[in-house]
Image: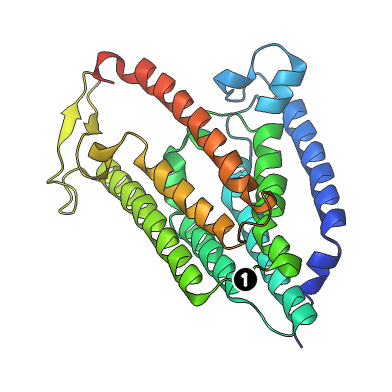
Amino acid sequence: GRAPLGLLYDYHAELALSTVLLCVVLSTYLYMRSRDPNLLRADGGNSGSTVYDFFMGRELNPRWGSFDWKEFCELRPGLIGWALLNMAMVVKQQEKLGYVTGSMMLINAFQGLYVWDALYQERAILTTMDITTDGFGFMLVFGDLAWVPFTYSLQARYLVDHDPHLSAWALAAVLATNALGYCIFRGANGQKDAFRRNPDAPQVKHLKYLQTKRGTRLLTSGWWGAARKINYTGDWIMGLSWCMLCGFDSIVPYYYAIYFAILLVHRSIRDDGMCKAKYGEDW
């Protein structure tokens, strides 16, 4: 028979609380094992303050053999859990209304594409700040396992009881907004990843770049000639389109666009600081 996904809606709060407790347990274990002096430490999580280091993470890439805890948690559990929660909201709306609305269909399609894209492009995360720089402490554990699935699915949960019944034209406009954001996001990230792997590849060899004193190349054309963090712009536009599917009766579904804007501004400032230290005058 049909999988009882509606139970994820019915026990949403209990699942969220259990996941937070799991995050505390895992973070405590990771902090305790990081006392081993032979482990590779992250610069940001070794301040000497127990609370700060527990939050930021002391060990860079905790592993059990070849199993990398940080790389696994960065994408798999949280993103897949997010998609499953969204599906549960579809089931619950069907139970309550007898049908699934256009907004609910599109939020599942948009966010399902986002999850698929992240998993399909998994190798690209190996060059991100989370993997290369940050320790694996409570901040990332909680963010990956609890924050992502239980807050990113807020729009779908809101739509179960508060669907705005947008017109076909409104849905088309939101679809166009999401498509614009995805094109910018995927185009910029794909271009950067291809250039990093092989700057002489046919699809990127025409791009202009700056040869840095440390021997690496910085893109100065294509998507990256338009803005320094153009991929963040596309990412935020996609997030805004998710919120727009909920209409304008409440600010609650727009928490994501507000929170994500703050996060991206903060992250871009961190990125700039690290790149300035890395590339010096060239940056």
Say how the picture is coloured: rainbow
Tag 1: residue type?
Met
User: How far across and down, in percent of the image, does residue 146 sit?
Assistant: 72, 47
Residue 256 appears left or right of 116? right
The C terminus is located in which quarter? top left
Q: Residue at x 73, y 25 (%)?
A: 54
- The image position of residue 69, as x and y in percent, is 63, 43
Quarter of the image where one finds residue 43: top right
Residue depicted at x 61% and y 25%: 39
Q: Position of residue 273 (x, y in %)?
A: 42, 19
Q: Nearer the viewer, residue 191 or 250?
A: 250
* Furthest residue in direction top, as rendered: 48
* Vertical placement of residue 147 versus 158, above or below: above
Q: Report the residue at 54% width, 59% height from top.
A: 115
Nearer-the-camera pick, 267 or 138: 267
Quarter of the picture holding the N terminus: bottom right
Residue 161 sits above or below residue 204 on the image: below
Image location (x, y in percent) of residue 26: 77, 39
Disc 1 target residue: 104
